[in-house]
Amino acid sequence: MSLSKSTTAEPTFSFGIEEEYYLVDRTTRALAKDAPKRLLAALRKRLGKQFSEEYMRSQVEICTPVCHDTDTARDYLTEYRRSIAAEAENFGLAPIAAATHPFSLWRHQRHRDKPRYNEIAEDFQVLGRRMLVCGQHVHIGIEQADLRIVVMNELRQYLPVLLALSTSSPFWGGETTGLKSYRTAINDSTPRKGIPERFENWAHFQRAVDVLVGAGLIDDASKIWWDIRPSVSFPTLEVRIMDVCPLVDDAICITAILRCLCRYICRTYKTRSAMVCPMVLINENRWRAQRYGIDEGLIDIDTGAIVPVSHVVSDILQRIREDAEYFDCVTEVERARTILLRGTSADRQVALYKGLCDQGFDADGALVGVVDELIADTVAAETHSLAGSTIKAPPEFARRV
């Protein structure tokens, strides 16, 4: 792709983070069936336009203002999570930042009565009723439209690694799914999801959108929910593949890596061959990230061999070292090695569940313990050590005799 002179200026690489949370009952740890109107009003007053209601009535969402450094972004996420926790506590509720709830059933949930949500529910039917998932979305400021397409094309092969590092949805409806990101499976059941094809330029992308709009299938590109997409509202590239992370520092780590990868691509794509990776390999890695998280390795695109995720991460960190130094976020991106050592949220949830079962708790009690851990993680002042968290007994649940 050739870019005009006006499109080759350095992007700002400003960024913003969106996170979706569940509201759970502090007594039962089950999802709230409906967030109290007074709670929603209090959150709108406290957080302003950075807060919004989500598709399901048990969900809420925050979005940061435009950020230019990771410290600011971390402060925003920490403040928003604690503000939601403080207000929710007045109603016997608590937020959890996890991509699926460990045991609450989708059949018991309802979507919010808003025109856009009603339209989605009517279109998707039972698939829409099962859309009980929470993610992390990151916008990266790339003002030049054609350059956004260049970066989107090349970022696709890195998306499975970001998913692997973020996995937080191993349970669904009280069952161990065997997947580290069951959220991905739920998302993939609805239209216009997954990793997009390669586009030649902005005009090529826009023509595809125009066909969908012209055929009356969508109103605009905001109803294209790919893992990565150009934003409709802002001059940004929006990456949507990640599960939401219970630990703020994990969310910041993944955001920092993503931001650095965008700059790496922009500063190097003219001096090397374009990375045209076959979709079959990208999608196979995506599946492996969804199924195994960081455990079983990914396909090395250059050699065709399965290599440990730690090798893939090390290669990425080496590539983006200059960019991490430029953005002063070396510590943040290096945290990926900590995630690899002590596991993602999905790993920790499964380990805690098994540990509680080994202690004599039944499955229901063990899953309550998992929710307790997620409540603590979501507003944690300090993150877990490499040794992981201590297994604690759910206080209201007795051991099975």
Image: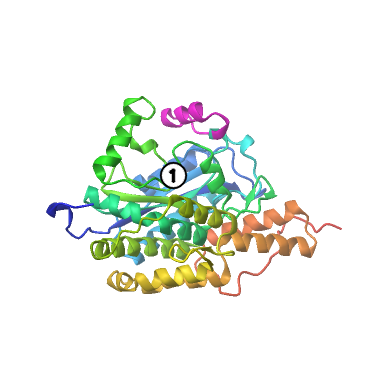
Q: How is this picture coloured?
A: rainbow
Q: Where's residue 88, x and y in %?
A: 52, 49
Residue 273 picture location, percent across and down: 29, 62
Residue displayed at 34% across by 73% down: 321
Q: Nearer the viewer, residue 349 or 84?
A: 349
Q: Position of residue 251 (x, y in %)?
A: 45, 60
Which residue lies most toward the right here? 401
Report whether residue 383 is seen. no
Foreground of the two, 46 or 393: 393
Q: Main secondary structure of the magenta part?
A: helix
Q: Out of 37 and 325, give the one closest to the viewer.
A: 325
Q: Is residue 216 left or right of residue 107?
A: left
Residue drawn where x is 43% and y is 62% of the image: 254
Q: Which type of secondary structure does the marked residue at label 1 adopt?
A: helix
Can you tell which quarter of the image residue 350 is in?
A: bottom right
Task: Tell me the residue that label 1 is attached to.
Answer: 42
Name the residue located 39 percent from the left edge and 64 percent from the top edge.
257
Q: Amino acid at mark 1?
A: Ala
Asked if residue 122 is among those painted magenta in the image, a careful observer would answer: yes
Residue 259 visible: yes
The residue segment tinted magenta is: 111-127
Q: Is residue 181 above or below residue 313?
A: above
Identify the residue at the far front of this view: 303
Q: Is residue 175 left or right of residue 73?
A: right
Residue 180 in magenta?
no
Q: Residue at x 80, y 61 (%)?
A: 360
Viewer-proximal residue among 36 and 175: 175
Mark 1 neighbour class, 10 Å CA radius: few under 14, some 14 to 19, many 20 or more: some
- Could you tell whether 299 is left or right of 200 in the image? right
* As drawn, 343 above or below 155: below
